[in-house]
Image: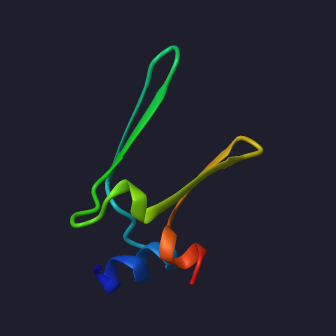
């Protein structure tokens, strides 16, 4: 894993590029995170707020 990516991600700086698209029935989000898989992230939706976090920081 790239420690620089996680440090920036956790500190809210230099976030990865994102593509977001919406249809009537869905929302798609693509993050530019080279070397990482979707399983490496924790994704949650609470009170209308979508949060995407590197999984290792949610469960150290």
Q: Residue at x 42, y 83 (%)?
A: 7
Q: Nearer the viewer, residue 54 or 20?
A: 54
The correct choice, above or below, for 56 with respect to 16 in the image is below
Q: Nearer the viewer, residue 41 or 28?
A: 41
Residue 35 position within the rendered picture, expressed as x and y whole percent measured from the top left: 22, 67
Q: Nearer the viewer, residue 6 or 41?
A: 41
- Using residue 23 as the reference point, say whether residue 3 is left or right of it: left
Q: Quadrant of the C terminus?
A: bottom right
Please, which residue is most extreme toward the top here?
Answer: 24
Q: Quadrant of the N terminus?
A: bottom left
Location of residue 57 by image quarter: bottom right
Q: Residue at x 32, y 84 (%)?
A: 4
- Using residue 26 as the reference point, say whether residue 20 is left or right of it: left
Please, which residue is most extreme toward the left here?
Answer: 34
Q: Residue at x 31, y 55 (%)?
A: 17
Q: Residue at x 28, y 81 (%)?
A: 2
Location of residue 19 by image quarter: top left
Residue 40 position within the rendered picture, expressed as x and y whole percent measured from the top left: 41, 65
Residue 30 position within the rendered picture, expressed as x and y whole percent measured from the top left: 34, 45
- Using residue 21 as the reference point, say whether residue 27 is left or right of it: right
């Amino acid at each position: 894993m790239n420690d620089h990516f996680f440090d920036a991600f956790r500190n809210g700086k230099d976030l990865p590029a994102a593509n977001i698209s919406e249809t009537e029935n869905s929302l798609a989000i693509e993050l530019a995170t080279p070397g990482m898989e979707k399983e490496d992230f924790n994704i949650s939706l609470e009170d209308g707020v979508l949060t995407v976090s590197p999984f290792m920081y949610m469960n150290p």
